[in-house]
Image: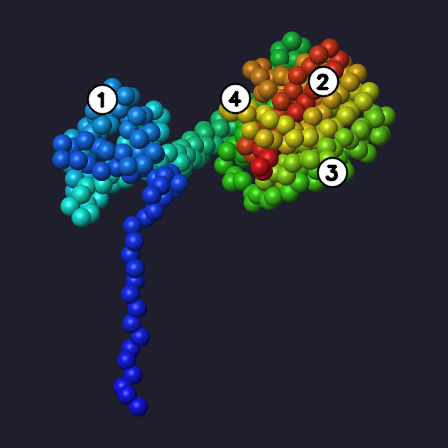
């Protein structure tokens, strides 16, 4: 037998078919001998038009690059360029004696990096705020002890009443301070992906009986396309439970709980898909409805309302927890009608 010869093959290298880069949305252009950028793809033509505003030459300087950035490009180092609120990554490549400019939209990556930096900043501020609130709570406790010590030694009824009210107000402030410090210092629990209907069912399981004992009719309405949310289930259930118990405490004639998808601008941001639990309470005393709205908004002076109801502090806690979860607790009243929305971002 003859000597076996190794199998050989040739790799055929062909140029990319015309229009391939356009199909991929790549911005590619070449730099001619005069330093002008010549677009070879539609994406590059669009980038040049955006960066030069149609009034400057299509060159590296014309697209807004500083001399230092141009020097970095000449050394084949990547450079970032920002124009019209978007960020682009530029790279210069030499091939077969020709210089080519590649441009990639890096807006999403830069926004993600900025968001990560902002998150670190917010966590630092939260830790600082928690420390300050903790120290403030210690001062409130000292004031509470002083008021309790002074009250028995006062003989004037007006002075004793003032000391009593001071103690009650200080106690309310200390309770809110403890709640706020706990929410700021404690990390969020593990988030889970669940149907929003599960959260509503769990909250209603512990409030339906309380409503029945007071003779309040409670009706649940759930949309067929009820959203799915990703949240800390225990805290979301607790927030909705506190909200419902505060409503029951007002003694309405009827409470309707409606779960449905909705577009909501949480925190004044853009509209986004959400799971919205809208609770309508009818036959609510007007004064009680207005106080409920003030508590949900955590409005200035709302601490004076905390002693009006056993559920008031729980309602304030619910509003704070909802914000902490990335959702919202909203309320408005119209006469004896009270409308409350418990909202969580939905998974799209």
Whether residue 252 is situated above or below residue 37 in the rendered picture: above
Q: Tell me which residue sits at (34%, 47%) in the image.
A: 17
Q: Mark 2 points at which residue?
A: 338
In the figure, is residue 149 to the left or right of 71?
A: right
Badge nearest the viewer, 4 or 2: 4
**Where 339 sits versus 137, above or below?**
above
CA–CA distance between discs 4 and 2? 22 Å
Q: What element carries label 4?
A: helix
Looking at this view, is 74 or 270 the one in front?
74
Picture coordinates of residue 32, whole percent (x, y): 17, 35
Q: On the rendered structure, is 244 left or right of 79?
A: right
Could you tell which of marks 1 and 2 lies nearer the N-terminus?
1
Asked which secondary structure carries label 1, the reply is: loop
Q: Quadrant of residue 343?
A: top right
| Furthest residue toward left | 33
Q: Distance between the residues labelled 1 and 3?
A: 62 Å
Left or right position of 212 against 310: right
The kind of secondary structure element at disc 2 is: strand
Residue 127 in the figure: left or right of residue 213: left
Location of mark 1 (residue): 56
Q: Where does residue 235 sit, x and y in percent of width and height?
A: 62, 37
Quickly name the residue at label 3: 201
Nearer to me, 126 or 12: 12
Residue 254 position within the rendered picture, expressed as x and y whole percent measured from the top left: 81, 22
Disc 4: which residue: 268
Q: Mark 4, residues whose alpha carbon is within 10 Å: few (<14), some, or many (≥20)?
A: few
Question: Reading the chain from its start, which is encountered first: label 1 or label 4?
Answer: 1
Of callouts 4 and 2, the N-terminal one:
4
Q: Which of 11 and 279 is in front in this view?
A: 11
Q: Outermost residue toward the bottom?
A: 1
The tag earlier along the polypeptide, 3 or 4, is 3
């Amino acid at each position: 037998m003859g000597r076996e010869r190794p199998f050989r093959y040739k790799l055929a290298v062909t140029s990319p078919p015309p229009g391939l880069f356009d199909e991929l949305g790549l911005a590619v252009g070449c730099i001619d001998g005069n330093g002008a950028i010549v677009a070879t793809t539609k994406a590059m033509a669009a980038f040049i038009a955006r960066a030069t505003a149609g009034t400057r030459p299509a060159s590296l300087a014309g697209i807004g690059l500083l001399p230092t950035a141009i020097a970095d490009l000449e050394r084949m180092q990547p450079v970032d360029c920002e124009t019209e609120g978007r960020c682009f990554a530029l790279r210069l490549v030499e091939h077969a004696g020709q210089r080519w400019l590649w441009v990639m939209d890096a807006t999403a990556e830069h926004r993600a990096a900025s968001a990560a930096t902002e998150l670190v900043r917010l966590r630092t501020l939260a830790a600082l705020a928690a420390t300050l609130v903790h120290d403030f709570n210690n001062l409130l406790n000292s004031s509470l002890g002083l008021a309790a010590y002074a009250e028995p030694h006062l003989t004037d009824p007006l002075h004793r009443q003032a000391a009593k009210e001071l103690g009650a107000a200080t106690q309310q402030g200390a309770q809110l301070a403890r709640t706020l410090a706990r929410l700021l210092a404690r990390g969020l629990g593990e988030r889970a992906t669940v149907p929003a209907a599960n959260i509503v069912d769990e909250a209603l399981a512990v409030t339906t009986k309380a409503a029945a004992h007071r003779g309040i009719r409670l009706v649940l309405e759930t949309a067929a396309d009820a959203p799915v949310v990703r949240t800390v289930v225990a805290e979301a259930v607790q927030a909705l439970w506190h909200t419902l118990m505060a409503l029951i405490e007002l003694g309405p004639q009827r409470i309707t709980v409606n779960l449905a998808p909705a577009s909501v601008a949480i925190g004044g941001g853009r509209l986004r898909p959400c799971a919205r639990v809208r609770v309508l309470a009818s036959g609510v005393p007007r004064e009680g409805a207005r106080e409920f709205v003030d508590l949900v908004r955590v409005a200035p002076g709302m601490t004076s309302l905390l002693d009006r109801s056993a559920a008031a502090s729980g309602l304030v806690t619910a509003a704070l927890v909802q914000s902490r979860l990335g959702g919202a607790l909203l309320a408005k009243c119209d006469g004896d009608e009270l409308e409350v929305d418990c909202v969580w971002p939905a998974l799209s």
